[in-house]
Amino acid sequence: MVRKLVTFLVLVALVGFVVLTFVMPSLPGPALDLLAHWSPRAAVRGFLDAAKADDEKRMRDFATESSEDFAKLASILDDLKADWSVGDDFVEGEMARVKLKRSGGAGREAVAIVRKEEGGWRVDLVATGIELAKSSLGK
């Protein structure tokens, strides 16, 4: 009985890992929105997709409360509308760093800062803007 339970739990964990790592980033928008706040990578992907679509309502849903004044963050938003691929995330308590790589030409790399807020992960645009500036300066 215990062996069956352990086997079941291992299988559930394995399926969850596969879904979060490989399937979730490629889900269609509405499905991703439902799951987006469960992982830093998904929150960044959701924000980037909303930025490309110029969907301010969805961008606000994926942004931290301190990032709400989008008018002051216009240059950051313009940079985030480019084609970025989302890489690994590194969770440090209530904060996470998510690697980004810009598609095309130089293949610029940067880091998105994501914070746990209201029970879910949200992109901190101010901190991410600082990281984007560092990456454009070659640091």
Image: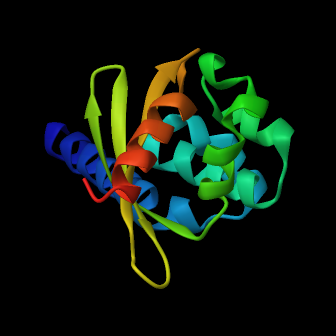
Residue 127: x and y in percent read 45, 31
Q: For the image shown, how many numbered marks are present on the structure?
A: 0
- Residue at image x 16%, y 37%? 2
Q: Residue furthest left?
A: 3
Instruction: Classify 122 as above or below 131.
Output: above
On the question of residue 39 being in view, the answer is no
- Foreground residue, 74 or 40? 74
Residue 38: x and y in percent read 51, 36
Residue 116: x and y in percent read 47, 22
Q: Residue furthest front?
A: 137
- Residue at image x 45%, y 59%? 19
On the question of residue 129 being in view, the answer is yes
Q: How is the image coloured?
A: rainbow
The quarter of the displayed image where residue 83 is located: bottom right
- Foreground residue, 44 or 52? 52
Instruction: Classify 114 as above or below 41.
Output: above
**Quadrant of the image containing the N terminus:** top left
Q: Is residue 117 left or right of residue 21?
A: right
Q: Is residue 50 left or right of residue 111?
A: right
- Residue at image x 28%, y 21%? 93
- Residue at image x 64%, y 31%? 63
- Foreground residue, 19 or 73? 73
Residue 60: x and y in percent read 75, 32
